[in-house]
Amino acid sequence: MKRVLPRLRLSYGQKLFLLASVPMILAVSAIALLVAAQSRALADREIRSLETQLIEAKKRELRNYVTQARNGFYFVYGSASPTDEDAKQQVMQILAAMIYGDEGFFFVYDYDGNNLVSPRQTELINQNWLDLSDSEGTPVVQQFIETARQGAGYVEHLWPKPSTGEEARMITYVTSFPSWRWAVGTGVFIDDILASVAASRAEVETRVQRTFLYIGVITLGALLLVFASGVMMNIRERRLADAKLKELTQRVFDTQEEERGRVARELHDGISQILVGVKYALDVARRRIAQGDTRAEVTLNKGIDNLQEAIHEVRRISRDLRPGVLDDLGLGPALKSLTDDFRARTGLETRFDTVVFRNRLDQDSKIALYRIGQEALTNVERHSGATSVVIDLRGHRDGATLRISDNGIGIEAAPRTARKGIGLRNMQERMDQLGGTLRILSSRSGTVIEAQVPLSHLLPPEEGQPVRTKVHA
């Protein structure tokens, strides 16, 4: 599993496509299921209503058959006694002759379960069928007799069709001749109704499946559209990213060249000239020593002083490139040293306030804030015309903030080359990499640069360390 998981890492474009497509698929699936459920429920209600109406029509038809038959021989039954066998035979003959349609007939059972009339299934006549049940276990004849004892009613059961001999569902209307203890009735097969209902349900299911198909096609089209849009967006973003990368690469090259030029100028204008002076002083001292001139010591001391100045210059350049105090003591002392050097070099009134961090910032944050402070002081020296600079560094519940303010002429009044330089962009990019924010407030009365690092870049405090200390420079 661990070997498979790295292979499942998705690109930004794939994540974007999933983000757009998965909610849409889920929503469309929910809508499709809801539509299908509602369609099935509505169709089921309509089909049940249709089935009920058809069956009620069949029941009314059966009741009419029985009523008409009874009216046809009621004059015989009404005037006969319970033991009048001639009347019974006459009524049985009338009922045996009353067949209708392809399957319709009348039947007669006495209350003991003996079949007396069955014109389409004569093999049942004169036999006792009290225990007869259909394939579903329904005691058919017993229900006929029970319904007749109660007066009249309907019985739904399975019965062999006279034409085919196969069982089919049937509704039977049974009435009673109580004085003769007869159950008289007729039935109608409702397999045509059941077939119609089944066909209707199949049609509904077909419509639901067709609806699913339409929704699926529409969803697929939408997914293809999202995919095509994502591809186009991805291509566009790649082009923009490539352009930005080229621009960033060019800026990196420009920054490197600018830094190399600055170091080269400082080496040439500073250290190189000092070392030339040292070489000249040593040559003069050597000649004077060879000549026994007492001024050789003065010249040698001057060369040593120049050499010491060269050493200081090398240390300054090294500190500008990468201050060792930043790694050894932390951001606060490094900025204080930067402030002291700036004050000594420019003569401007410079103050540094801080809450000591005890190296609580991570390495990336320390470097970023130091470079922002360094760049800000460079801009103050070159372009602002300020006489006073305040640097403030402190931590708080949201992270850490470096604030550099001056009383100069502001960015808008500065030379155009200063406004279009890469210093401010470098500050912004450093903050973007850390997830921090950079605010620049400028007016004719001065400029404030505020860089804030989020709390995620602060390391936990060491046990027993002091929480707040203020340093002024």
Image: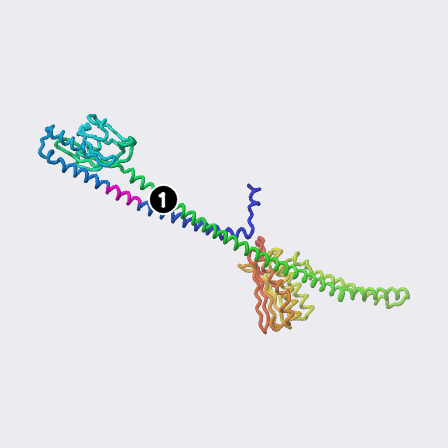
Which residue ends up furthest to the top in the rendered image? 127
| x 21%, y 30%: residue | 119
Q: Is residue 113 visible?
A: no
Which quadrant of the figure contains the N terminus? top right
Does 107 sit above or below residue 36? Answer: above
Closer to us: 230 or 66: 66
Percent x, y of residue 418? 64, 69
Residues in magenta? 47-57
Name which quarter of the figure residue 453 lies in: bottom right
- On the rendered structure, is 201 left or right of 225? left
Q: Is residue 428 visible?
A: yes
Residue 53 on the magenta segment: yes
Q: Residues within 10 Å of mark 1 (few under 14, many from 20)?
A: few
Name which quarter of the figure residue 342 lies in: bottom right
Q: Which residue is mark 1?
A: 203
Percent x, y of residue 423? 64, 65
